Image (cartoon, rainbow, N blue to C red):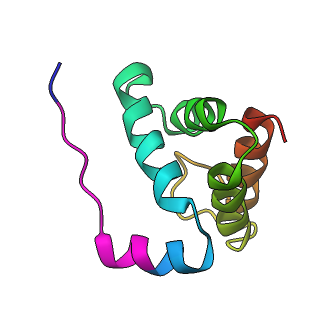
Amino acid sequence: MRGAIFTCSPKLAMVEASFPGFTTFTLMHERAHFIVGGNERAADCLAAQWLGPSAPPANAAAYFATQGPLVINPLYGSGLERAARIRACAGM
């Protein structure tokens, strides 16, 4: 299987500065797509399970929580829903 992961390095760097480990979570989320396909919620959960209760999923959840009830992309749900999902799947 072949694939590619494309990121926006300036955005990742900006978020990473305030939420250390966010980049690690993002890359694990993208890798999870090789297993779960295009299901964004499942990719969040699998990445969080792989990383367990550690800084990357905790800080990714904290970042998404800053979006509050706003739904930027319906495939993920609101920022608060995404944060809760990541925390639950990481066992936090």
Residue 61, how many percent across, how many down? Answer: 70, 57
Q: Is residue 10 magenta?
A: yes
Question: Which region of the structure is painted magenta?
Answer: 3-13
- Left or right: 55 in relation to 31: right
Residue at image point 57% right, 48% down: 76
Residue 18 vs 76, above or below: the answer is: below
- Left or right: 47 in relation to 32: right
Residue 20, how many percent across, how many down? Answer: 59, 67
Q: Quadrant of residue 9?
A: bottom left
Residue 91, how many percent across, how many down? Answer: 81, 34
Question: Is residue 38 in sight in this rendering?
Answer: no
Residue 90, how many percent across, how many down? Answer: 73, 37
Residue at image point 55% right, 36% down: 47
Question: Is residue 39 in sight in this rendering?
Answer: yes
Q: Name the quarter where the N terminus is drawn.
A: top left
Q: Name the quarter where the C terminus is drawn.
A: top right
- Left or right: 32 in relation to 53: left
